[in-house]
Amino acid sequence: MELAEETIRKAQQGDANAFSDVLDSSYELIFSVAMKYVMNRQDAEDVTQQVCIKLARSITQYRFDSSFSTWLYRVVVNCANDWHRKESRHHQSTNDVAQNPASHNSDVAEQQLYLKQVLEQIGTWGKGYLDAVVLVIGEGLTHQDAARVLDVSESTVSWRIHEVRKRLHLLESGGQNS
């Protein structure tokens, strides 16, 4: 997904066609990450729209000291977290599953609801856990790449993933040590 530096520089200078190229090549990544955070299409579209607006306002802040995708992940993560703080209490889990066209099959709907509940639970554990899960497990980033996006150490990302696995295992086993 890496864009040509020339295209990014033109977009930073106000070239509308270059900015359109940036959006076209970035949209799939933006929407994919947003969807993993919010778990339904309508809200993912809202988050994606916010990212596009923020990208238009902040592309001049990209300094080429990391890959563009790393910088963009950071923008998406920040917008998704802002959305969660503002909106997540206003949505019902049952509506989310019903709105998703992939949930025609009751098994799929049940799995989606369970995944949403797990992600919501992880989101209550404090700053950074959900971000690490979405980037490492959902997006397939390495711990090192996720650390660059989140501006933390690689060991912090590794610890967060370890903690999530440990806590989920405890929840699965009913809080008893196996």
Image (spheres, grey):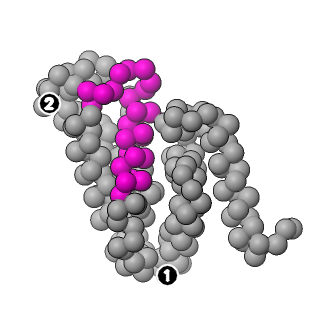
Kind of element beneath mark 1: helix
Residue 57 higher or lower than 82, as above or below = above
First in sequence: mark 2 or mark 1? Answer: 2
Q: Is residue 81 magenta?
A: yes
Side of 170 relative to 52 (left or right): right
Q: Position of residue 94 (x, y in %)?
A: 42, 80
Residue 57 higher or lower than 175, as above or below = above
Cβ atoms at labels 2 and 1 below 8 Å apart: no
In this view of the protein, which residue sits in the foreground, 125 or 162?
125
Rendered image quadrant of residue 72: top left
Label 2: how many Cα within 10 Å (few below 14, some 14–19, many 20+): few
Residue with the mark numbered 1: 106
Q: Main secondary structure of the magenta part?
A: helix
Residue 108 higher or lower than 5, as above or below = below
Kind of element beneath mark 2: helix
Which residue occupies 17% across, 22% down?
13
- Going by the numbered disc 1, the residue's amino acid type is Ser
Label 1: how many Cα within 10 Å (few below 14, some 14–19, many 20+): few
Rendered image quadrant of residue 26: top left
Q: Position of residue 40 (x, y in %)?
A: 38, 66
Which residue occupies 30% across, 28% down?
61
In this view of the protein, which residue sits in the foreground, 143 or 82?
82
Q: Position of residue 153 (x, y in %)?
A: 61, 33
Nearest-to-viewer mark from 2 and 1: 2
- Going by the numbered disc 2, the residue's amino acid type is Asn
Farthest-out residue, right = 178
Side of 133 relative to 173 (left or right): left
Residue interval drawn in magenta: 59-83
Residue with the mark numbered 2: 17
In this view of the protein, which residue sits in the foreground, 7 or 51?
51
Rendered image quadrant of residue 88: bottom left
